[in-house]
Each structure stands twice: as structure tokens, then as C-alpha cells.
Amino acid sequence: MNYLAGLLVASFAISAALSHLNQGPGNYWDFVAFAMVIGGTIAISVIIFPWSLYKVLYSYAKKLFFNWQPNRQVFIRHCLETFSLHRQGAKIDGLNHNNFEEKILAEGYELLNLGIKPDRIEAILSERIAHFEDIGERVAGSVLSLGKYPPAFGLTGTVLGLVELMRGVSAGMPARETGVKMAIALVATLYGLLVANLFVIPAGEHIRKIVYTETKLAEMALQTILMASEDIGLLEAQEMLNSLVFDSERVNFIGTQS
């Protein structure tokens, strides 16, 4: 289940729990809790995220919320199409440089056309893939690291609420109002737990999965380039790429061409 769908399920579950308790969302709103948890989390994100990675983080955020799901069957077919064109000596156009795997594919054919030896092409593209994976892992790791801070800020908000509560008790606050103040103070801890365990940590885990998938697609593109540099047939190339995916994702490109 993707990230956005998971958030919707969690929202439904929370709404059902509130309904069962005969309570509305307004009972759990507190500005101090919101300011401490959200403001503190944003502040820490500014501190721990290198500025150079914000553009990368933004690209992964879009993939989180817009349900980026690569189709490996489609990409294998695309790799085989470019492989077939290269064997025929045709020009390869239409590659989307916004997708990292297609960028590797395009750069690989460009290096082949420049006459660079296959072993050097493999070294160059492997280094670029490793660099891409390292950046993605840094982003995912930073998001996961951020997940430990919202509960701490939530606890800080709770402490602030308890300080106000104790002052009220010492000033003769009625028992009924004391209970309300205690409940409001605990809301900050709730906010911290929800932000960390419902938003931040799952986002980091999902970004890590996206990085892994993109890296595997890029390695598939590299394998296509290396096969294009050798004198092998389309059938062998098809079977090699099919060996990199699940049985259900394999393609029969040759059968569709005939």
C-alpha cells in the first residue's frame, strides 16, 4: 500500500476511534502542542538537512504523495526497444532524462557512440549509480533521523502544559478545570507520537524503498548498455533482463515483434 493510501487508512482509524469515544477533533486541538511539535520538527529539519539535498527531498516528496510506482515490465520493454534500435544502427531518441534509469540508458548509448570501451563505460555508469544511491540514502536517512524528534518536542509541550497546570493548582484552580488542563497538556505528547510514527518515519522508509527501486532500474539500464556493446542477439538480451525481475514481470518482446 502506498504512502498516501496508508495515511487515509490511518485517518479513518483515528476518526473511528474518536467516534467510539464520542469525542470530536476539537477536543484534541491545542495551539501550544501544535507549535511545539510542528515548529520544533521543522526547525530540526532545517538544521540536519544539507541545503544541497532539499531539491532531492522535494522530488521524493512528490513521488510519495503522487504514488510513484515504476512498471518494470514497461522498462524492460523499453530497454529492449533501444537495444534493438542500436543493433540496427538507428538513432535512439525520446529518452526521458528526468528519470534516472532512462538518463543512465541515454548516457550509456552516448558513451558507446563516442567509442569508449565497455569496461570503462561500466566503471563510469556504475560510479554514477553509486553516487545516486548514496544521495538517496542520505535523504532517507535524514528523514528517518528526523523521526526521533517530534516525540521529544511533544514531551516538551506536555511539560509546558504541566507547569501551567501546577501554577493553576497552587492558585486554587477548581478540580474540573484541573482535569481539562491535564488533558490539554497530554495532547502535545499525542501530537509528537503521531507526527513521528504516522508521517515522518514511514516517509523515510518509503523513500528508502524508492531509492532501492530506482537503483535496480538503473542497474538494468547499465546491463542493457553492456549487452549493446557486445555482439549478442535480441533473444539473449531479453532473457538476461527477464532474469532480473519476478516471473510475473517478464516480457516476450520478440514474440510481440514477430
Image: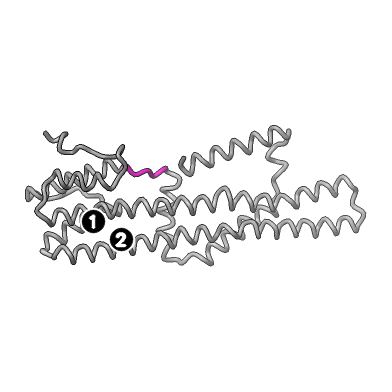
Tell me if 238 is positioned left or right of 136 in this view.
left
Q: Position of residue 249 (x, y in %)?
A: 29, 39
Residue wearing tag 1: 222
Q: Extreme right residue here?
A: 172
In the rendered structure, are the residues bearing label 1 and label 2 in contact, judged by CB atoms less than 8 Å apart?
Answer: yes
Residue 234 visible in the picture: yes
Depth check, front residue: 112 or 66: 112
The image shows residue 98 at horizontal and vertical percentages of 30, 52
Residue at the image position 41 percent from the left and 66 percent from the top:
52
- Kindly identify the amino acid type of the residue bearing the numbered disc 1: Leu
Instruction: Name the residue type under label 2.
Output: Ile
Cα distance between the residues tagged 1 and 2: 9 Å
Residues shaded magenta: 67-71
Which picture quadrant has residue 15?
A: top right
* Vertical order, 28 against 223 (above or below): above
Q: Nearer the viewer, residue 202 or 63?
A: 202
Res 98 seen here: no
